[in-house]
Amino acid sequence: MNDFWTQALVGPLETLGKKLLALLPNVLAMVIILAVGLAAAWALGCLVERLLRVVGLDHLADRLGVNAALARGGVKTDPSRLAGRAVHWVVLIVAAMAGLGALNLQPVNQFAQSLLAYVPHLLTAAVILAVGYLLSNFSSQAVLIAAVNASLPPARLVAACSRWGVQLVAVAMALEQLGIAQHIVVVGFGLAFGGVVLAAALAFGLGARDLAKEFLERQFGRTEGQNKDDLTHL
Amino acid sequence: MSPAATPLTQETEASVRAIGEADVLVGIPSFNNAGTIGHVVRAVSAGLAKYFPAARAVLVNSDGGSSDGTPDVVARAGVDLGAMLISDRQSPLHKIITPYQGIPGKGSAFRTIFEIARRVNAKACAVVDSDLRSITPEWVELLIRPLLEEGYDYVAPYYLRHKYDGTITNSIAYPLTRALYGQRIRQPIGGDFGFSGRLAEHYLDQQVWESEVARFGIDIWMTTEAIASGARVCQSFLGAKIHNPKDPAADLSAMLVQVVGALFALMEEHHRVWAIMDGSNQVKLYGFQYEVGVEPVHVNVDRMIGHFRQGLADLEPIWRQMLAIETMEGLWPLHDCPLQAFRIPDELWARLVYDAAISYHRRVLPREHLLKALTPLYLGRTATFVLETQGLTSAEAEGRIETVCEAFERQKPYLLERWGKP
């Protein structure tokens, strides 16, 4: 009976204990790496931010119009802080990878490697989203001004549609880059975009038929003599 | 560093060499103006023969690749000097018909004219539009003689215009140019100018020919550059300016982008010149002035005010970025006031234009967006002007424009104070 207990329970537990004991230095190393990485990320982030402030990056960016471009895109943070945060996160991700590597476990190593291989896709997706966001703000502003100058009553609606349209394209592209349900994203985007265009066409053609008629007449000068001004601007 | 010489075609080079030197040069930029340019060439030819019979004269047609036979019309156009009682023409008129090179636009056409003026060492030059229907031989004298006999470097046109003709000039270009540079040039974007050979050379030496100036904005650029370079400036009364309607595709916001964009860009370039300028001076006006009765014209003020109010409702976040808080507060009461009480006061309008110039300078918005977002504001101001001048003669309406200019001059310290601030 004693042999049975020794073989069935104590033996595996001893093996597990030995394995855990063997792993413990690795876990400890991972914790230390993560802790140091966290501290280094915080310190480097702050250092880079302060250093950039001291060398006057914000002032330079202001003169080059970068701050204005960021503000136009709805980003209120100054470039020094942005750079500091970027350094913080890069160091943190590198530390996390190094920490996982320190465990020296086959599955974890494979996971870390595949995660590392995924980083470029993540970065590309992030860039696509950021550019899409900035582009959507720029295009919606242009559309809003053009619609107001054309005296279109639903100017804000048209501008909002253009903003969401561009952002939808950016999200679809980012998801495709991340490899998430690629076909569903493409088909879903096609359906959604086609649906929006069709809905807009129907709404403008049927729901706002008079508005469309008035707008087109104004564009092609059919109402000449009724609303046309005789003053000349130049 | 001076920019490279403007390239001319071989044929034009040969013509320039054959002419040698000239006293007077008149340039006509064109693009598909076969219907009108013949009259312009005849008027210029007669003007040169009648008023400058002894001068070695050159007529340059700088064409943008017309497909309607414009150069042929220029080549054929001639005037019967006998019928005009001109018998003492001592020097033949040379004609150069040349395509211009570079970015398509009036600016590039002018560049070729300036280059030919430099090559033939012309003392006095003039440029006139090719779609003019009201040009007479007297225009040539009025644009050229002040240069040759009075020592001026630049002659701006002064047209007889209806009070509702040229509203961008009246509400922005004239008041702003006058307040900034201290010279009361009534038509800074007139289109027909006289200038000395020296000034033509100065124009050529500027590094602007690959910029927007080459496409449009050349008129205000020439006037501003002349004042800012310290050239002696005068005006000539040319009477009415009747020309073909402008391109209908060129809408109002595009016009504002061209004219106001050029004005604001020049403000950045000549900041040191206008920052020290205080008040404004009369500019000598040549020619016999007269007035004609005012014909009633149709202006849809309600539509303009409606446009302004839609802008106030929909573009408010954009206007908040480009205008000062006090300026926005001044606009809000106009949202609900009765139509007949609708007014954008002179001082508010001046501050508004200055705010826009400062925002353009600081690039708080994409520049084209900023300029286009001015359209409803400009229409609101035009509606104000129409409401204030209904029933007035053009001379009386001119008095109202004078008070707008004074408001721009009074508000200039506001511009100076805000311009340099971050």
Image: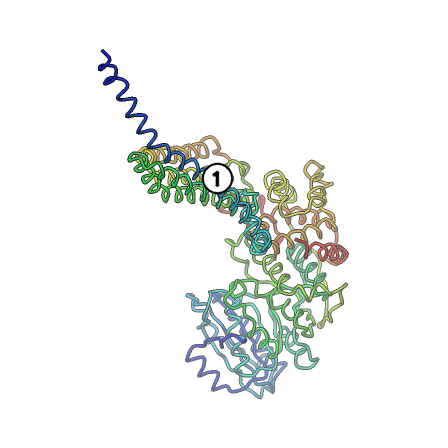
Point 48% across, 38% down: residue: A213
Percent position (x, y) of residue B298? 64, 48
Q: Is residue A204 left or right of residue A6?
A: right
Chain of the residue under label 1? A
Quadrant of the rendering where the N terminus of chain A is positioned: top left
| Color encoding of the figure | rainbow
Is B256 located above or below residue A206 in the figure? below
Q: Is residue B162 left or right of residue A37?
A: right
User: Which residue is situated farthest in the front direction here?
Assistant: A2
Q: Out of A173 and B333, give the one closest to the viewer.
A: A173
Q: How many marks?
A: 1
Point 56% across, 52% down: residue: A51
Quadrant of the rendering where the C terminus of chain A is positioned: bottom right
User: Which residue is situated farthest in the top direction here?
Assistant: A1
- Which residue is denoted by mark 1 in the rendering? A38
Work out whether residue B295 can be spotted.
Answer: no
Q: Is residue B283 left or right of residue A166?
A: right
Percent position (x, y) of residue B94? 51, 82
Percent position (x, y) of residue A70? 54, 47
Work out whether residue A35 can be spotted.
Answer: yes
Is A95 located above or below residue B140 in the figure? above
Q: Secondary structure at mark 1?
A: helix
Q: Out of B218 and B3, give the one closest to the viewer.
A: B3
Is A3 located above or below residue A207 in the figure? above
Q: What amino acid is found at the position of numbered circle 1 in the picture?
A: Leu
